Amino acid sequence: MSETPDAPAQPDAPAVLELSRIAKAFGAVVALTNGTLRLERGSIHALVGENGAGKSTLVKIVAGLYQRDAGEFRLEGDSVDFTSTAQAKDAGIAVIYQEPTLFPDLSVTENLFMGRQPRGALGVIDRRAMRAEALELFERLGVRIDPDRPTLGLSIADQQIIEIAKAISLDARVLIMDEPTAALSGVEVERLFAVARGLRDEGRAILFISHRFDEVFALCDTVTVMRDGAYIATSPIGDTTVAEIVRQMVGRDVTTLFPKQEVPIGDVVLEVEHLTQPGVFTDVSFVARAGEIVALAGLVGAGRSEIARAVFGVDPYASGTVTVAGRALPRHSPAAAMRAGIALVPEDRRQQGLVLSSSVARNATLAIRRQLARLGLITNAAENASARIWASRLEVKTASLDTEVGTLSGGNQQKVVLGKWLATDPKVLFVDEPTRGIDVGTKAEVHRLLSELAGQGMAVVMISSELPEVLGMADRVLVVHEGRITADIPREEATAESVMFAATHTAGEAA
């Protein structure tokens, strides 16, 4: 057994926040054995690790949601142990989550000052003072947001900025950004990074949690790696590499993130002809063959997910046909699509792919419950037997099949959704953003699985916004721009440039 890695070197001045050998267990499940982290003033510190590495548990201890079982927790050199989120906020800890939780019917200003509105001499809320301070906060952050508009309808990016402004108004010393860029466009990411750098220059400590290494290297000064609930290493960002971080995260070298098998391409399984839904997509035609991985690429909002949902029957379409193995499908009928052998793993696994309060076994068998029923009843034994097959094959990390799926890591939730649909033995598998929000090790596992499925003769249609994933896994790339397929590029001709030119509909300029 290897020794526990040493904690990072400690300068004479106390850190803003310091965690040392934090342990936390939930019954028989050990989430942390050695949570160690040191945040300095005026720095942006990345925390990386696979799903299930213990990052979220460590953050929840800092935020006051959980209390540690063992270890040291210091703030400005003083030992602390928050028993509530209110205590953490009062001490200057702010957490900016991937999806902020603001009150949609209240204005931006009202959300900023919820529960602490300034009052005049007669105890009346001083709305003018609130608005003035809101404007000052946004100016300080270098952003323009109307303080009077309702929060309903604001982008995720603007909602995150409001949360950051709230933290600054409370004079937060430590800001924790937990996967803040997952739902942001490139422009929004750059704006968020500019705000983060400004806060760093003010002397605040920022903890940045992300699976995106390009962002970690572009923004952060230092990186800490965790694995299996334990601290592995801390390095200045300039002294490490992506390959080294990946090796530390997974405990091995990931020699290839895109293990694409070369398999013979068979007959056409899926044929889509002239599919049109006015205002959404127009004259969409393509085929997918047995053993083939077809990527639907393009910018966010191009209509890729909408096409997949229409083919599967979730969304309607006005004209066109969908044919599977020579048989035309009726419109707007997921049941007919499933009977024909189509499966759809949706982009939003938590909202559309899982019942979070139900068990792993129940979720893994949702799509085949009719087959499992005997005289109209489904036994726990039948449910568990079916779920166990896919949980084992996909290496789902869970204490038991009875565990609520909502408590699993993002990568393991994605595996459960995949298992649910693979249990239907599909001919055509649509996977929408199959590796969004999951760690590098699990990404490689998902890619390997998709390649194996294609090798077994399945037609795979993969929707992805990650160009390396598209180029690494696809036999053909169908590029979608404003609801139309603008290019059909074979693997040997697909490059980042050719895909992006087609995605922005500037292919003619590339010539």
Image (cartoon, helix red, strand yellow):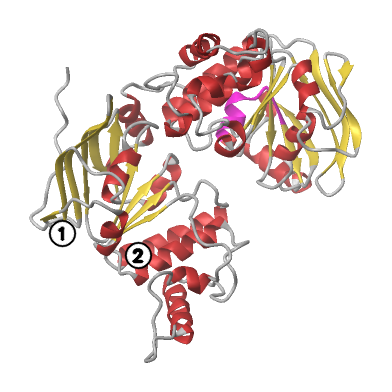
Camera-nearest residue between 386 and 137: 386
**Which quadrant does the C terminus fall into?**
top right
* Spatial CA span between label 2 and label 1: 18 Å
The reply, left or right, for residue 256 in relation to residue 270 is: left
Whether 473 is among the magenta residues is yes
User: Residue drawn at (33%, 34%), measured in percent from left and top?
Assistant: 245
* Residue 72 visible: yes
* Residue 238 visible: no
Neighbours of disc 1 within 10 Å: few (<14), some (14-19), many (20+): some
Which portion, as a residue range, is magenta? 468-477
> Residue lying furthest right in this view?
319
Expressed as whole percent of the image width and height from the top left, the position of residue 332 reads 83, 32
Which kind of residue does numbered mark 2 sit on? Answer: Leu
Expressed as whole percent of the image width and height from the top left, the position of residue 448 reads 53, 18
Find residue 374 and report its image quarter. Answer: top right
Q: Secondary structure of the magenta portion, mostly?
A: helix
Q: Is residue 201 above or below residue 271?
A: below
Secondary element type, mark 1: loop
Residue holding disc 1? 76
